[in-house]
Image (cartoon, grey):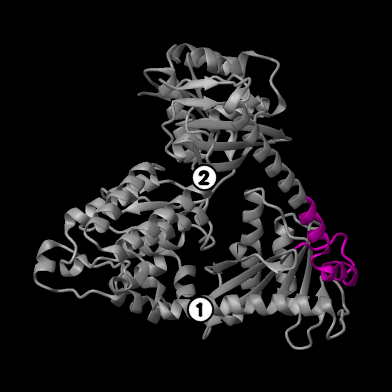
């Protein structure tokens, strides 16, 4: 969007706090921002001349502006964080973290179970976490099992079911891990007392648990139940050992979030320490990608908002290495100069420095590993006289089911290993059966690389065509039509002699039968063959092999059979004109059939369709 175009819509922007969204010509969300004054903030993008290259590129792509007015700047901050997390716009700060963190759930049910989960379900259950370490979760659950008897079975322990005697105690009861509520051997009140102690443990409040066990031990001693008293005493010692393993800082330091940040190129690393009851209960270091050269103060403020939301922090004080703009009611930002909080900040900085060093070491190792992971790739480069090492190889093969349901299978190898997320199956619509093998190959290759071009993806260095000169020539026609000559090397692999053919060469290339190069090429060829066969096997198992005409809405089985009798095949129906179809099934149904086959190429089964068209050059907004 030009500055002149923006001036036409600038007066329509509100001068109130809120968030604004930028969209490109295809309706893709580019950027979400917050502002005290929406008009003033958005105008700065189009009136200033000192923007970085990345910001200039953002402005160049903007075609539509939307906004949402909110009550306060803090509301704008929360909404901005929520939208960025949900849509991950191209130009916004990106928290490079896609993990589903584990939680400990106390299930909303009679005699609640306590277990690990990665999914939060709004069913009234109580969740604790999330935790950054599965190991910590398992330690907590093992500790609970050792000290507090709870049921682990999935039985529906309603009062009615228990009264009817539907259940029998299991081995957990005999091991002492459960008190047998299924047979009414434990009351709901006693079980709820155990759950209360679990909640105290998960909140880091160990004192009430100590008091509960000491009271229970004293009662056993007074009743001369010394064996039971000793069992409770063991739990107290176990609890003391667990407390000693906790990272206790200072009992006077409570409800505190500590953050530090270190920038390394376009990536910033933020460390988070969460303190409760004087102990570090969470620690997390997160890589953050800065996409518009944002200052570290802005990156840290944004990441603090995201992490506090993710981990459900309600701490009223945040320790940071420098002042930041973080507008959350009742929350104080502290930049410590000394004392316990300064030590905590230094601990956080030590963690983030360690993480950065580890990342650098991994990158150095990965570079060396990728270069030397498969010396065979260098061998293929020499054997096939390629201009570069083929770290990205793709292979095509045609497959059909008794001459019907033709597909083109494609597999992808990166650094000599299968990249199964890149595998594709193309359901062919312009060919029919094994007698059109060349056309099938051309269609599969054309659709694959047309898509990569449209999406701006990298092209492979080497493309293997499973077949002889005919299939190789058909694939080359697709490459020529796409204008990709010279950008990749095509080679055909003859099925019988395992000879390699290049486009235009009369003589084949025969590699030593047991050479590393040919072994990898054969492995790739076998992989694509299995991929195509598996696709047909899956279709057979799902019962999806049927007359395709029956899939057309408005065309029944009888009409489909009539069409096949008249035109011999689905491809024959597809090639027929509207007049020819109308003579057989009438003009109404003929239009339905023709509309079905004119709906456009069917895309890869595992790839989404293209983005929607451009939107209007105008602001849209509302609350």
Q: Where in the figure is residue 114, as x and y percent of width and height?
A: 33, 57
For residue 367, say whether it is visible: yes
* Helix, strand or loop under label 2: loop
Q: Nearer the viewer, residue 436 or 50?
A: 50
Q: In the picture provided, is 156 more to the left or to the right than 361?
A: left
Q: Provide the residue designation for mark 1.
A: 536
Please state the extent of the stretch shown in magenta in the rendering: 364-392
180 versus 211 height, above or below = below
Quadrant placement of the N terminus: top right
Q: Residue at x 59, y 34 (%)?
A: 93
Q: Residue at x 32, y 45 (%)?
A: 211
423 versus 338 height, above or below = below
Please name the predominant secondary structure of the magenta segment in the image: helix
Quadrant placement of the C terminus: top left
Q: Residue at x 83, y 63 (%)?
A: 372
Number of numbered callouts drawn: 2
Q: In the picture provided, is 136 more to the left or to the right than 175?
A: right
Label 1 or label 2, whichever comes before in sequence order: 1
Q: Where in the figure is residue 497, as x and y percent of width and height?
A: 79, 88
Disc on res. 611: 2
* Helix, strand or loop under label 1: helix
Residue 435 is drawn in which quadrant?
bottom right
Can residue 623 be found in the magenta stretch? no
Q: Nearer the viewer, residue 29 or 431?
A: 29
Pointer 1: residues within 10 angstroms few (<14), some, or many (20+)?
some
139 versus 491 height, above or below = above
Pointer 2: residues within 10 angstroms few (<14), some, or many (20+)?
few
Q: Nearer the viewer, residue 147 or 128?
A: 147
Q: In the picture provided, is 505 more to the left or to the right than 149?
A: right
Can residue 390 be found in the magenta stretch? yes
């Amino acid at each position: 969007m030009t500055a002149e175009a923006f001036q036409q819509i600038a007066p329509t922007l509100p001068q109130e706090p809120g968030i604004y969204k930028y969209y490109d010509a295809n309706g893709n969300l580019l950027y979400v921002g917050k502002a005290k004054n929406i008009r003033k903030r958005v105008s700065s993008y189009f009136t200033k001349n000192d923007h970085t290259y990345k910001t200039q590129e953002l402005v160049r792509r903007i075609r539509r502006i939307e906004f949402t007015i909110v009550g306060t700047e803090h509301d704008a901050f929360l909404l901005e964080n929520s939208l960025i997390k949900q849509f991950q716009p191209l130009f916004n700060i990106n928290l490079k973290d896609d993990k589903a963190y584990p939680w400990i759930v106390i299930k909303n049910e009679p005699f609640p179970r306590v277990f690990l989960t990665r999914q939060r379900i709004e069913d009234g259950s109580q969740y604790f976490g999330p935790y950054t370490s599965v190991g910590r979760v398992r330690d907590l659950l093992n500790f609970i099992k050792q000290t507090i008897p709870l049921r682990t079975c999935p039985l529906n322990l309603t009062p009615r079911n228990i009264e009817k005697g539907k259940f029998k105690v299991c081995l957990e009861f005999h091991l002492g891990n459960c008190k047998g509520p299924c047979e009414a051997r434990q009351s709901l009140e006693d079980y709820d007392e155990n759950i209360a102690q679990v909640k105290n443990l998960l909140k880091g409040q160990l004192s009430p648990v100590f008091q509960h066990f000491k009271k229970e031990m004293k009662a056993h001693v007074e009743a001369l139940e010394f064996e039971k008293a000793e069992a409770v005493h063991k739990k107290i010692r176990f609890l003391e050992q667990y407390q000693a393993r906790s990272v206790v800082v200072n009992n006077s330091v409570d409800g505190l979030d500590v953050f530090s940040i270190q920038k390394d190129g376009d990536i910033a690393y933020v460390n988070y320490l969460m303190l409760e009851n004087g102990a570090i209960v969470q620690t997390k270091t997160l890589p953050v990608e800065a996409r518009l050269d944002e200052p570290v103060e802005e990156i840290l403020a944004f990441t603090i908002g995201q992490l506090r939301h993710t981990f459900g922090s309600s701490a009223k004080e945040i320790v940071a290495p420098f002042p930041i703009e973080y507008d959350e009611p009742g929350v104080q930002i502290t930049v410590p100069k000394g004392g316990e909080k300064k030590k905590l900040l230094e601990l956080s900085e030590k963690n983030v420095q360690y993480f950065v060093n580890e990342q650098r070491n991994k990158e150095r190792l990965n570079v060396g590993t990728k270069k030397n992971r498969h010396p065979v790739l260098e061998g293929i480069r020499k054997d096939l006289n390629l201009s570069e090492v083929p770290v990205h190889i793709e292979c095509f093969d045609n497959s059909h089911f008794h001459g019907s349901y033709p597909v083109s299978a494609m597999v992808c190898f990166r650094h000599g290993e299968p990249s199964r997320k890149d595998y594709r199956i193309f359901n062919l619509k312009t060919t029919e059966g094994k007698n059109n093998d060349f056309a099938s190959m051309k269609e599969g290759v054309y659709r694959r690389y047309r898509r990569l071009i449209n999406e701006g993806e990298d092209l492979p260095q080497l493309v293997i065509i499973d077949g002889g000169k005919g299939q190789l020539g058909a694939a080359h026609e697709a490459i020529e039509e796409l204008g990709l000559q010279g950008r990749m090397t095509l080679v055909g692999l003859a099925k019988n002699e395992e000879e390699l053919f290049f486009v235009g060469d009369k003589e084949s290339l025969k590699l030593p039968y047991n050479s590393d190069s040919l072994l990898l090429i054969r492995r790739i060829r076998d992989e694509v063959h299995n991929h195509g066969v598996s696709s047909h096997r899956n279709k057979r198992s799902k019962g999806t092999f049927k007359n395709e005409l029956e899939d057309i809405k408005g065309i029944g089985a009888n009409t489909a059979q009539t069409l096949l009798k008249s035109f011999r095949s689905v491809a024959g129906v597809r090639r027929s004109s509207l007049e020819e179809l109308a003579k057989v099934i009438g003009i109404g149904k003929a239009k339905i059939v023709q509309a079905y086959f004119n709906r456009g190429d069917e895309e890869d089964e595992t790839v989404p369709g293209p983005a929607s068209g451009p939107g209007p050059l105008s602001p849209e907004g509302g609350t």
